[in-house]
């Protein structure tokens, strides 16, 4: 938009400049014409003076002819001078009008240029602000990802021994129930996408765990209790938390609920088909 406006203003400015040059050329030509006419009138005046001096010597008939010629020249000069003055006044007026129009156009062009410069500066400033905001978001997201990986690694390192002890105690107390759960867990097969995500997550956690072990020592009990409450909602969507067995139990319960819903839907479908068959038989009996 700004480029098109500038181009239109430049074209108009060039047209006015061309008109001004043409007016100046016409003015110069008319000035030359007036100077020529003035020179001719002055030469005619000299001729008239010479003729008047010779008229005293010439007879009466010749003086009368020269006087008539001088009167004709004077009348022509008097008729041409007002016309030339009017033409010169008109040209000067048109030149003044063109100069005023060019001045207004130049002021308008300067105003448009200032607006375009302010607009470009505002656009550049907005672009820099957006880039800074995106950079801050990228850094904060990277920092949150690293913090999440480090905290999950600390939780794994702090809770590993406790989970092993609790699992051993639970296995000794619930031998009968564990065998049934293991049989159900063996029947469940995870999709390939879940397995791939699990492998990628475990590889990333192992890398972060190695980096943390090289730099710091993770507490055992206090860190586990402190971070378990804060990371429960965050880590639930990214890995099996608090343990794989709990995740499997939740999946088993959900699958059982799905099976019950499917069985109820199948029963309703069978009942509806039975009603349709009975209605069809009754309609056939009525027609017979």
Image (cartoon, rainbow, N blue to C red):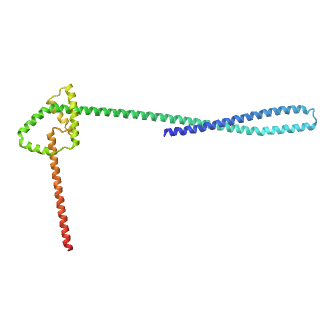
Across and down, in percent, residue 255 comes to 16, 48
Is residue 173 left or right of 145 when viewed as pictured?
A: left
Across and down, in percent, residue 174 comes to 6, 41
Q: Identify which residue is drawn at 53% across, 38% down.
A: 7
Across and down, in percent, residue 112 comes to 51, 36
Observer-nearest of 43 and 159 = 159
Across and down, in percent, residue 2 comes to 49, 38
Outermost residue toward the right in this view: 59
Observer-nearest of 139 and 78 = 139
Outermost residue toward the top in this view: 215
Tell me which corner region of the image, top left, top right, bottom left or bottom right, holds residue 237.
top left
Tell me which corner region of the image, top left, top right, bottom left or bottom right, holds residue 193.
top left
Quadrant in which the C terminus appears = bottom left
- Number of marks in picture: 0
Tell me which corner region of the image, top left, top right, bottom left or bottom right, holds residue 251.
top left
Q: Is residue 76 visible?
A: yes
Q: Identify which residue is drawn at 86% across, 32% down.
A: 49
Is residue 274 left or right of 133 when viewed as pictured?
A: left
Observer-nearest of 1 and 80 = 1
Q: Identify which residue is drawn at 17% across, 57% down.
A: 266
Q: Is residue 237 visible?
A: no
Q: Identify which residue is drawn at 34% across, 32% down.
A: 135
């Amino acid at each position: 938009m700004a480029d098109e406006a500038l181009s239109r203003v430049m074209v108009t400015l060039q047209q006015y400049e061309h008109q001004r040059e043409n007016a100046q050329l016409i003015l110069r030509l008319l000035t030359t014409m007036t100077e020529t006419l003035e020179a001719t009138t002055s030469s005619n005046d000299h001729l008239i003076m010479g003729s008047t001096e010779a008229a005293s010597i010439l007879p009466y008939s010749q003086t009368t002819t020269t006087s008539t010629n001088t009167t004709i020249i004077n009348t022509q000069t008097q008729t041409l001078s007002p016309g030339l003055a009017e033409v010169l006044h008109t040209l000067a007026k048109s030149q003044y009008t063109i100069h005023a129009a060019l001045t207004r156009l130049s002021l308008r062009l300067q105003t448009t240029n200032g607006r375009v410069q302010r607009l470009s500066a505002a656009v550049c400033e907005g672009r820099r602000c957006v880039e800074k905001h995106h950079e801050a978001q990228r850094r904060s997201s990277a920092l949150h990802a690293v913090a999440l990986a480090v905290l999950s690694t600390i939780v794994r390192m702090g809770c590993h021994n406790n989970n092993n002890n609790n699992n051993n105690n639970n296995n000794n107390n619930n031998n009968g129930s564990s065998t049934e759960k293991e049989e159900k867990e063996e029947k469940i097969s995870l999709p390939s996408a879940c397995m791939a995500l699990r492998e990628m997550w475990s590889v990333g956690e192992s890398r972060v765990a190695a980096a943390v072990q090289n730099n710091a020592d993770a507490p055992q009990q206090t860190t586990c209790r402190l971070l378990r409450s804060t990371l429960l909602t965050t880590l639930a969507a990214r890995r099996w938390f608090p343990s794989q067995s709990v995740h499997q139990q939740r999946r088993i319960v959900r699958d059982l609920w799905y099976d019950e819903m499917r069985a109820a839907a199948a029963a309703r479908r069978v009942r509806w088909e039975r009603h349709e068959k009975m209605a069809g038989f009754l309609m056939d009996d009525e027609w017979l």
